[in-house]
Each structure stands twice: as C-alpha cells, then as structure tokens.
Image (cartoon, rainbow, N blue to C red):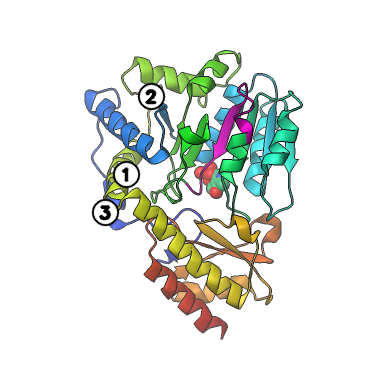
C-alpha cells in the first residue's frame, strides 16, 4: 500500500504532476528546450518575487548550497545556523576549503538581526548563509529583521536556504535583498526529488568573477554564463523530466493563486500546532513557528517508530526527529499540495492510535 507522505521531503506528488515526468524526451540543445527553460524561469521569478536570473541544477538543493558558498566567497563566509541544515552549509564551506565561521544558536531559537549585525560589523565577511526554514527544528527565521541588518553591509552576498519553504511561504527575494535564494523540487514545490533552483543576483555574479576556483559542475557563474550565451540552455544535460513537471506544476500553483497557497499552508500549520499544543508541546519558539512543517516535542515519551508503523498500516507516514532529536521530537510536514482535510485525517488517525 502506498503511504501518504507527511514527511518534510520528499512530499506527496499529485498524479498528474507525476505523469508529466514521463513526457517523451526532447533534445536539450534545441529550441524547444530553450523555450521550456525560458517559461520555467519566468514563472519562478514570479514565485520568488524577483527579477534576477534563475538557475536550475540537476542536483538536490545541497548541490546549489555547496555551489553558492564556493562560487561566491572571496574573503570569508559567516554561516548562521539554527539547526542541522544551517550547520551543513558551514561543513560544505570547510569541505571546499572556503574560509568560514559558524554562528550557531540553541536549537529552537532564531537567528536574530542583532547577532547578524554583531558578526558583520567585524568587517571580516563577504558572504553569509542563512536558513529561511529550518527543517530539523520547525522554525522559520525572522526575515525582515535579518534582511534589514544585511542591507547595512552592501559588500555581503546574502545566501538563503529556502529549500523547505519556497512555494509554501511568501519569500520576497528582491525586497529582502537576497542574492542567492535556493530551493529543491521535493518539498513545498510538490515535485519528485532531483532538481535544485536558485536566484542569482548581479552582486553574486560580480562576486563569482573574483573567485578563481569555483569548482566545475556546481560553478554558479558557469551555469549563468551558459544560459545567457546559449539561449537558456545548460552546460551539461539537465533533467528534462523535472523541467516538464516543474513547468506544469508552476502553472497549477498560479491557478491556485500564490496568496491562497500561502494561506492554505498557514491554515494547515495552525491545525497541527493546535493539536500539538493540546497533545504534546511545540519544539520551536512560539514566535518563529514554520508554516510548512511542525516539530513536536515528544513530552509523552511515545515510541515514534511504533506510532509510525501503526500509521503505515493505515496508509500514512510522518517523520521522526532529526539527528540528535530522533526520539525526543517528531515532525509533521504540511506542505506542497497537502490539504487541510489531509491534515485532519492524519491527526484523527494519530489520536485514534495513541488512545
Ligand atoms: C531538505 C533540506 C535541505 C537539503 O536539500 P536536498 O534537496 O535534500 O539536498 C537543505 N536545507 C533544508 C532547510 C532542507 O529542508
């Protein structure tokens, strides 16, 4: 039996979106491939609230995260972490011999504008990485506050991990001054895993030109140069299957309407939060709860694996805690094309199993 996924990626993909993955192939050097890429770009610019170029990478989101920190740090990177994925970005910098420092806060707490200001005022850094939505802790960072601070430092390239929120929560890339905003297909966008997307600002382009060793496959400047010169094509063969499905899914997203989509995510989030407050407790600080997933504190010390296998028999799957929080928390994703009714059905089944 297929289990309906309530895990924070990969998410449930609608049958018609999935079917687009089996569209017959076209040549990746032809006019049709250029047109496909151009269409996708225009729609993604609307979704990202940006006029900047859009890059696609046939990798998961981690690919573009690694590419961004390597391609655009000339001096030193400051990596702000509120959980597992923030720390991962720092580890990517280190693994690429990019000078970097990690600024971690206690899990469940946000990156504050004050911390960013303190760090950037040292003048040591020319790139920062920030997590928009931390999938381990279920926390959404206060972007207005962070963005206002970063704007005081025009030399800094602002990289944002929006892997688990883009498409489910409003992120106004240009208004916030984000230079590289990264997401993956398998989370709030509601597609299968295998492609990553980012915006790439003029500042980021100029910075990359100063960096001598940007790698090869994940060199963001190389991707950008190629789509500029070769009419929206890529240096290597992209996953055309994802592009067909993405083109279609973006159309569906605009049919629903962005504001409706974001409101639906908030409604689902509130359902899960209220349930969690009554039955358990929330892990993240109440002021910074994520709209796309909820991390629940396992205050009743239930066996999450047992709960999940009971849910599995009923055709549902949720997620245990991330890494060190494996048994202390569990997570329910409410993103992409999940509905309020799906959430009610899931929570009803959990209650039924636990009682
Ligand atoms: C899933 C996730 C990633 C990693 O993305 P992949 O597409 O699996 O490489 C990075 N950051 C956040 C916040 C995530 O949720």
> What residue sits 46% from the left and 39% below the top?
172
Does residue 161 show up magenta in the picture? yes
Q: Of the residues under marks 3 and 2, which one precedes in the sequence? A: 3
Q: Position of residue 320 (x, y in %)?
A: 60, 64
Q: Which mark is residue 234?
A: 2
Place of residue 258 in the rendered image (x, y in percent of width and height, measured from the top left): 35, 49
> What segment carries the magenta color?
149-165
Disc nearer the start of the sequence (3/1): 3
Q: Ligand 1 near label 2 (Cβ, under 8 Å)?
A: no
Residue drawn where x is 71% and y is 34% of the image: 117
Residue furthest bottom in the image = 355
Q: Which element is circle 2 on?
A: loop
Depth check, front residue: 151 or 273: 151
The nearer-to-camera label among 2 and 1 is: 1
Report whether residue 308 is seen: no
In front: 107, or 175?
Answer: 175
Which of the 4 image quarters holds residue 65?
Answer: top right
Of the 4 image quadrants, the one containing the C terminus is: bottom right
Look at mark 1 in the image and give the residue it sits on.
250
Q: Which residue is mark 3?
A: 16
Mark 3–mark 2 CB contact (< 8 Å)? no
């Amino acid at each position: 039996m297929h289990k309906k996924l309530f895990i924070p990626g990969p998410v449930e993909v609608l049958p018609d979106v999935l079917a687009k993955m089996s569209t017959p192939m076209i040549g990746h050097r032809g006019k049709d491939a250029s047109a496909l890429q151009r269409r996708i770009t225009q729609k993604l610019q609307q979704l990202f609230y940006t006029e900047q170029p859009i890059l696609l990478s046939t990798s998961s989101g981690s690919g573009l995260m690694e590419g961004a920190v390597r391609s655009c740090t000339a001096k030193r990177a400051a990596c702000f972490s509120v959980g597992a994925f923030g720390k991962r970005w720092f580890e990517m910098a280190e693994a690429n011999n990019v000078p970097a420092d990690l600024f971690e806060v206690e899990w469940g707490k946000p990156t504050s504008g004050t911390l960013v200001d303190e760090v950037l005022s040292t003048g040591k850094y020319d790139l920062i990485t920030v997590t928009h939505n931390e999938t381990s802790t279920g926390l959404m960072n206060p972007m207005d506050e962070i963005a206002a601070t970063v704007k005081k430092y025009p030399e800094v390239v602002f990289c944002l991990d929006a892997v688990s929120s883009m498409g489910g929560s409003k992120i106004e890339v240009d208004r916030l001054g984000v230079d590289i905003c990264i997401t993956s297909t398998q989370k709030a966008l509601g597609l299968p895993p295998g492609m990553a997307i980012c915006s790439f600002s003029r500042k980021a382009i100029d910075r990359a030109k100063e960096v001598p060793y940007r790698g090869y496959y994940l060199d963001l400047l190389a991707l950008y140069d190629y789509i500029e010169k070769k009419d929206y094509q890529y240096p290597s063969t992209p996953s055309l299957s994802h592009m067909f499905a993405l083109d279609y899914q973006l159309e569906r997203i605009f049919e629903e309407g962005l504001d409706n989509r974001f409101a639906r995510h908030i409604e689902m989030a509130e359902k899960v939060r209220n349930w969690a407050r009554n039955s358990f407790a929330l892990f993240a600080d109440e002021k910074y709860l994520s709209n796309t997933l909820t991390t629940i504190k396992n205050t009743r010390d239930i066996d999450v694996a047992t709960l999940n296998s009971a849910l599995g028999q009923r055709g549902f799957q949720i997620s245990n805690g991330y890494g060190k929080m494996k048994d202390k928390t569990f997570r329910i994703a409410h993103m992409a094309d999940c509905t309020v009714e799906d959430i009610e059905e899931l929570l009803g089944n959990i209650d039924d199993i636990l009682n």
